[in-house]
Every structure is written in C-alpha cells, then in structure tokens.
Image (spheres, helix red, strand yellow):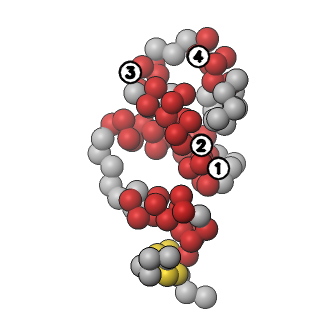
Amino acid sequence: MGDTVAGPDGRARCRWSAATPDYIAYHDHEWGFPVSDDRRLFEKLCLEGFQSGLSWRTILTKRENFRAAFAGFDFAEVARFTDADVTRLLGDAGIVRHRGKI
C-alpha cells in the first residue's frame, strides 16, 4: 500500500486525505503550511484541544460553528468571555460541548 493516492483531480495526496472532501481541502491548503497569524494560531490551538479524544474529521465538520461560537477566534474577545458565555457554549449543539474543553 502506497503512502499517496490520486485525488479526484488526479493530484497525488497523502492517503488519509482521500476520506472526505473536507480532508482534501485541509490537505491542500492548510496541513503542513506554516501559520504566523495570531488569530489562526489561536484557532488551531483551540481546535486541537477540542479534538482531543475525537477524530479530526469531527472538528473540521464543526469548524465554522466553532468560529461563530468563539468570536472568529479573536483571542482578545474570547478573553472577555464570562460565565454566561460558557453556559451559551455548553448549549451550542454545533460545537463540542465539553466543559473541561470550553
């Protein structure tokens, strides 16, 4: 079994990326690319924490919901979140609702 597979467009990609279109986009535009933007770094850090114990596919599927729930990952705004925000997040079915991760 090879390490790469041809995608629908004929491009060779890592085998894991063939599972879903979300993985293909992630592979082609994000995976392995350096990130220096603070907001994008904060997003990646948060999403990696939420992913713990779950598949990355679950997180990618919910990523837009996470962005909406966490103020676009504006860390200055998230730092001002209150207990009311935690309650709101715990009730948001679009994200991973784990108190320890929130």
Q: Residue 58 carries which label?
A: 1
Residue identifier under label 4: 85
CA separation, marks 4 and 2?
18 Å
- Callout 2 secondary element: helix
Asked if the residues shown at circle 2 and circle 1 are in contact, with their CB atoms under 8 angstroms apart, the answer is: yes
Residue that protrudes farthest toward the left in the picture? 36
CA separation, marks 3 and 4?
14 Å
Image depth: mark 1 or mark 3 in front: 1
24 left or right of 51? Answer: left
In the rendered structure, which amino acid carries the disc numbered 1?
Answer: Thr
Q: Which mark is residue 33?
A: none
- Figure quadrant of the C terminus: top right
The disc, 4 or 1, on the residue closer to the chain's N-terminal end is 1
- Callout 4 secondary element: helix
The disc, 2 or 3, on the residue closer to the chain's N-terminal end is 2
Residue identifier under label 2: 62
